[in-house]
Amino acid sequence: MEFKDYYAVLGLERTVAQDEIKRAYRKLARKYHPDVSQEPEAEARFKEVAEAYEALKDVEKRAAYDDVANRYQHGQEFRPPPGWNSGFEFSGGDFDESVDFNRSDFFESLFGHPTAGARGRGQRAGSDHHAKVLIDLQDAYRGGRRGISLRVPRIDANGQATIEARHLEVNIPKGIRDGQHLRLAGQGGPGQGDGPAGDLYLEIAFAPHPVFRVDGRDVYLDLPVAPWEAALGTGVTVQTPDGSVQLTVPPGSSPGRKLRLKGRGLPGVPPGDLYAVLSIRLPPADTPTAQDAYRRMAEAFGDFHPRGTLEA
Amino acid sequence: MNTINRTATPCVIVEEEVQFTLIELSRACRTEIDQVVELVMEGVLTPSGEDAEHWQFRGATLRRARRALRLARDLELNAASTALVLDLLDEIDALRSRLRRLGGD
């Protein structure tokens, strides 16, 4: 595993005062938090930043990390020193169990796994788990069986945590929308004693599609037409996520006109609509013939004033 | 160990078929009840029902509550700031969805 330079991740020198660490974290967290950020790779960056902060915000953990950091550089192969785990005792098992992400192997080799096992005996319901699942728009149109792989932390009888691969088959309901959640009862964390297992929540996200944009149940696509098609009207064949349909472009259509295909959006009660948004492509004037055609058009439309009142 | 299930695991769409009590929502958000109550008090979440014992949250609340709790935890915000951020994010969502309809993104 690689050594991680947590100071570099936060853009700090190793000698900084403790409150600088908090300041640097907060600034980066605002920039990269997946709920607010539009930065590319925001989620991955935020995880790094959050992990670095978790290691450095606590004075004891920071001291332990510094001790290791003095011997390594970022990206260097890291081997935990022998007896490492027994060398430090951290006051408080202050792992935030609500944190959704997995910390890196490097972090866990230093500070250990969160152990939920020590939280008392007896009957206790298992915790609810969450995972995100990326599906294609077509899957939402048709519904159907989908295999899902999850990495699940498991606590064994000795209170040790390990990561297990788990495979589930789920029937994606027809008409599911981006951002909705599926609840799989009893598929979350196991209960203690006779306590019931928790539930598993799957957050559905649509993979970006090169042609279709989705807004709730409605689906949009850009439909480019030639100027004469927009002016005179035409019939076109349009690919929808659910097969192709015939569509009439009415004469006298302007760019931005939305042609609605009722009920061709995501299925449901009521189903969404599919909108083809017209855009007009101009043929290039890159041959004498094409230039002549534009000149003839200019003559034919001598009364046409595209800038209207701008030139009054 | 891999667990292979050949039959599909039953599931429901939370936003359409589920209502949460306060306890259920707290569990689903993996948080303490007090934190969810605080979000209700700040007007971030709006359950139906007279008092906390009878509160019912719509399924769509799960997404909103988790977002609020993540922001509060990761950006170290208090409930009032969280409420403001969520309102602004709602507005951004509405603008983005308008952009999508226009094909502007």
Image (cartoon, rainbow, N blue to C red):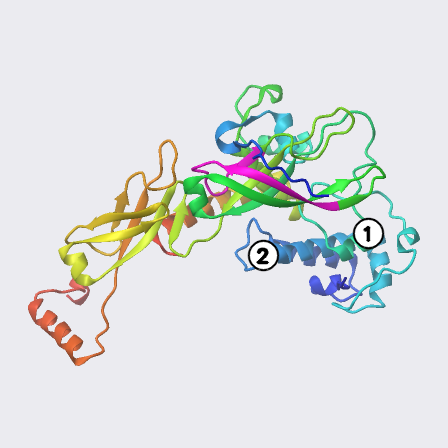
Could you say where residue A10 lies in the image, as x and y percent from the top left? Answer: 70, 61
Q: Could you tell me which chain the residue with mark 2 belongs to?
A: A
Could you say where residue B34 lies in the image, as x and y percent from the top left? Answer: 68, 30
Q: Nearer the viewer, residue A157 or A11?
A: A157
- Residue at 70% of width from left, 35% of height from top? A189
Q: Is A177 in the magenta?
A: yes
- Residue at 45% of width from left, 40% of height from top? A177
In the picture, which quadrant includes the N terminus of chain A? bottom right
- Answer above or below: position of A225 versus A259: below
Tag 2 or tag 1, which sits nearer the N-term?
A: 2
Give the CA distance from mark 1 to mark 2. Answer: 25 Å
Could you say where residue B35 lies in the image, as x and y percent from the top left? Answer: 66, 34
Q: Which mark is residue A42?
A: 2
Quadrant in the rendering for residue A105: bottom right
What segment carries the magenta color?
A163-183
Answer yes or no: are tags 1 and 2 on the same subunit: yes
Q: How many marks?
A: 2
- Answer above or below: position of A247 versus A158: below
Q: Amino acid at mark 2?
A: Ala
Q: Is A114 in the magenta?
A: no
**Element type where label 1 sits in the image:** helix
- The residue carrying pointer 1 sits among few (fewer than 14), some (14 to 19) or many (20 or more) residues within 10 Å by Cα, namely many
